[in-house]
Amino acid sequence: MTAKLIDGTAIAAQIRDQIAVDVQKMQTEYGVVPGLATVLVGDNPASQSYVRMKRKACEKAGIASFPNELPADATQAQVEALVQQLNDDPKVHGILVQLPLPKHLNEEKVLGLISLHKDVDGFHPLNIGRLAMKGREPLFIPCTPHGAIVLLEEAGAKIDGANAVVLGRSNIVGLPAALLLIHRNATVTVCHSKTKNLPEVCRQADILIAAVGRAEMVRADWVKPGAYVIDVGSNRINDPSAEKGYRWAGDVAFDEVKEVAGAITPSPGGVGPMTIAMLLKNTLRGAELVVTGRVKDLI
Ligand code: NDP
């Protein structure tokens, strides 16, 4: 392997340790325990497992977690009433609505209802809008793309002036990742399913962020030698030789790309743990905004 391994698990663990210290400090100084409310609608096993992981991470860091579950056939009014109730609850500093919501629900309306200062996923249209504008600061940055950028910074990538390519333009990963890179003065190309000559475009990248949801799509000959490669992808693929009959793979063909890239994240063990660390950080920030009274100036 020639590339430096960007160990998301280790970097996330350091961040989480610091959060635990800061949570303790807040409790001592202000008598306030940061609290995260999760909203899970339906019984999608992947969503259930994500929510479980997030709650466990909260507990380890000393953050209170308030689980809320609604059945798959919950009405729009029921989901909105729950979000409103959590908005009004002073013990709750962050609200996480696990996506995707069942198809009959209006996701945009639900996300737009979350109080701006509790929007720890950063998906409120105003937070995303501020992220998209020059000279504006969102209260919260979406956790997965933020985690990807922190990994680049920790690995020593020079983002300022770099050519960056983001593969994927989803609202939750690709688009905010591109915006964060622009804020850091990268020259950014965003690719999607209609992009022509994808390998050629990717080969121009000093920084390549892959968030397409296609297992091992990015091959060695797509990557510029020495590039920083961040693999957001998390794809379950059948593998009869694995104990469970499947394994997890990223969007990057790790075994071959690691021989070309300058630095690379594994998947699993890269962006995934960072997503959770950023969520805890945002929840702590939500509580800080309240205890310091700064929330009034920012919303
Ligand atoms: P989406 O399906 O919402 O978006 C995928 C994007 O990739 C779209 O913009 C789509 O283009 C583009 N795309 C799909 N196929 C191709 C292709 N063949 N060529 C070029 N572009 C393509 O996915 P998400 O953004 O939600 O997730 C992306 C990956 O990241 C997934 O593997 C997901 O599991 C993972 N993920 C990981 C997280 C973590 O914490 N580690 C958190 C969130 C996601 P178009 O817009 O044209 O359709």
Image (cartoon, rainbow, N blue to C red):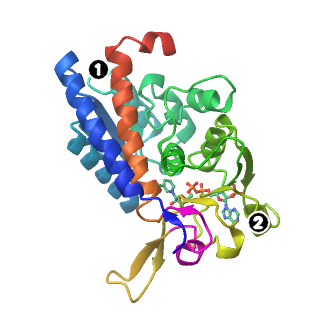
Point out the stretch of residues depicted in magenta.
250-265
Q: Residue at x 61, y 42 (%)?
A: 176
Instruction: Give amino acid for label 2.
Output: Leu
**The residue carrying mark 2 has its beta carbon less than 8 Å from ligand 1:** yes
Q: Quadrant of residue 208?
A: bottom right
- Residue 203, image x, y percentages: 74, 65
Find the residue positioned furthest to the right.
196
From what the image shows, is residue 30 above or below residue 167? above
Residue 28 placement, left or right of 83: left
Residue that protrudes farthest toward the bottom in the picture? 241
What secondary structure is the stretch in magenta mostly built from? loop
The residue wearing badge 1 is 90
Answer yes or no: is residue 69 visible.
no
Q: Which residue: 56% across, 46% down?
A: 172
Nearer to the camera, 218 or 117? 218
Q: Position of residue 180 (x, y in %)?
A: 61, 39
- Quadrant of the rendered image holding ligand 1: bottom right
